Image (tube, coloured by chain):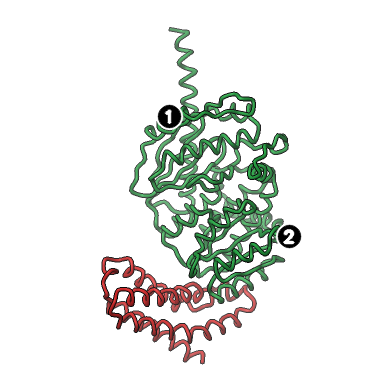
Amino acid sequence: METICRINLHFLLNCPKLAIFPGMIVFNLSELLRLMRGVQTELETGKMKILAVDDDPIIVELLTQFVGAIGDHELCTAYSGQDALRVLEENGADTFDCFMLDIQMPGMDGIELTRKIRSMSRYLDTPVLMLTAMSEKRYIDAAFSAGATDYVTKPFEVSELKARIGLVEGLVKARQTRTKKIFAAKALGEIPASPNTAIELHAPLSIYDVDHVIDYLAMENYVAQLSRNALFGSSTFAFTVRQIEDLHESTSPFEFYSMISDVAEIISDTLAGKQFLMSYAGSGTFVCVTESGWRPDPVQLMDSVNLSLAQTELYDNQGRRLQPRVSTGDVIRMIWKTGNSVMEALASAHASAEQASHHFEKSQNDFWYMGQTA
Amino acid sequence: MMHVRQELPGLDRIRDRFIEMLADRQTMIAHHALLAWEGETVEAVNENLYAAQCVLHQIGGTAGSLGFDVLGKDARTCEMEIIAHLEGPDADLAICPGDLIYHVDNFVGSCRALLDLKG
């Protein structure tokens, strides 16, 4: 039931018809299930081209039967990482919509294969499901860090896999929206000037080529996977870019995306040497999940990031200097949390950093107000 | 695992294939475990244990989905035991723990019992 509830939230968050944002908690499970079935039905009409890679012929046969049973999808199979790369090359422009990869394979393992797939511009944000018997945290960390979208442990249940594939279908549809245009232009080195590629302030963004930065959906799947395997002892905290509304308003979508990417890179560099994963959750907020054993000092981190930001010259297309600065919120221990309370911890970290940002802005205003009345 | 049995068509055929492959796989596990037990160098011990682990990994990944839950869990337990040895303090010694071989032997016995039942 725990899994179903989490997946429902993903469906809802990815469904453009429903205005539900990260951090919002839905308590009515039966209503949630009803909504999910509706969304799934809508998504089930789509056809995906899937590449499954596993060295075990039994798994390949199971997946073939499974994919045939859940819809009108096209499944290609490969028995090794090298075999998969050959299939990708042969298919050329006829791209895949989804990958299902085993981790432990002779030669190139699934994590290395994920990295290679992600290095191809056409597969920057294609959903990658890891189907693996490896449930240890180091494999989970490595898989998500390499670019995995979700993680299903073998032996899998059809109902669970079906739900995950349903989620992937939603992602495939979402890829056809505005953000894809921006990323495609970015990959080509072009600057999209069209206002049609608008980025919503509250929407999570996928950021590429920055170490330890993963998609927000992948982040949710990552923490859910950790809690599911009772391997939890990590902390979460967040950075929020101050005055993000103004920055969003005054920049083009590409400039905004570039600025967010630059801030992500600076945060990632600041946290270098620590074991962590982070994600842009929207509204100028980056949520980080750190390895157990490291208790971050948020104020010190905020100062370090802001110092790096001050030393980095960021400009918009008109040559105006952008000077983003961040605030950090509370560090929330995730130990002993399970299911929805894990997601709540992420949401609390997010909210705490946003609150810290608002307090900072308010204190700036109060400073001038106090000056006038003194 | 009931979901798999109820929902997936063609599962009987896959289960038959699994049993067919299990005959070869249990022989491979026994073969590598024996070579590891008799190995006189670190490489001989560790390489054979790793080879046995890979086969156990494959059994552990599919047995549960096909209704052989106990066999799958046993395979996973043996696999974890080998991983713990290969990453443990004795990994650089030409030692193959007796307990580990005992458990692998039990697992091979379980495979044979299942094969006899299905054969």
Q: Earlier in the sequence, mark 2 or mark 1?
A: 2
The image position of residue A200, as x and y in percent, is: 64, 37
The image position of residue A291, as x and y in percent, is: 39, 49
Please give the count of numbered marks on the rendered protein.
Answer: 2
Which marked residue is nearer to the observer: mark 2 or mark 1? 1
Judging depth in this view, the residue of A205 and B63 nearest the camera is: A205
The Cα–Cα distance between marks 2 and 1, rounded to whole angstroms, is: 50 Å
The image position of residue A135, as x and y in percent, is: 44, 63
- Residue A187 lies, with reference to residue A138, above or below; the image says above
Question: Would you name the residue on which mark 1 appears?
Answer: A307
Say whether mark 1 and mark 2 are on the same chain. yes
The structure residue drawn at horizontal position 39% and vertical position 57%, both measured from the top left corner, is A231
Question: Would you name the residue on which mark 2 appears?
Answer: A45
The structure residue drawn at horizontal position 56% and vertical position 50%, both measured from the top left corner, is A217
Three-letter amino acid code of the residue under disc 2: Thr
**Which chain is rendered green in the image?**
A
Q: Chain of mark 1?
A: A
The structure residue drawn at horizontal position 34% and vertical position 45%, both measured from the top left corner, is A294
Which dot marks residue A93?
A: none
Three-letter amino acid code of the residue under disc 1: Leu
Choose top left, top right, bottom left or bottom right for residue A96. Answer: bottom right
- Residue A311 lies, with reference to residue B94, above or below; the image says above
Judging depth in this view, the residue of A341 and B81 nearest the camera is: B81
The image position of residue B92, as x and y in percent, is: 28, 69
Q: Residues within 10 Å of mark 1 (few under 14, many from 20)?
A: few
Choose top left, top right, bottom left or bottom right for residue B102. Answer: bottom left
Could you tell me which secondary element the residue under label 2 belongs to? loop
Asked if residue B104 lies left or right of residue A57, the reply is: left
Q: Chain of mark 2?
A: A
**Which chain is rendered red in the image?**
B
Could you tell me which secondary element the residue under label 1 belongs to? helix
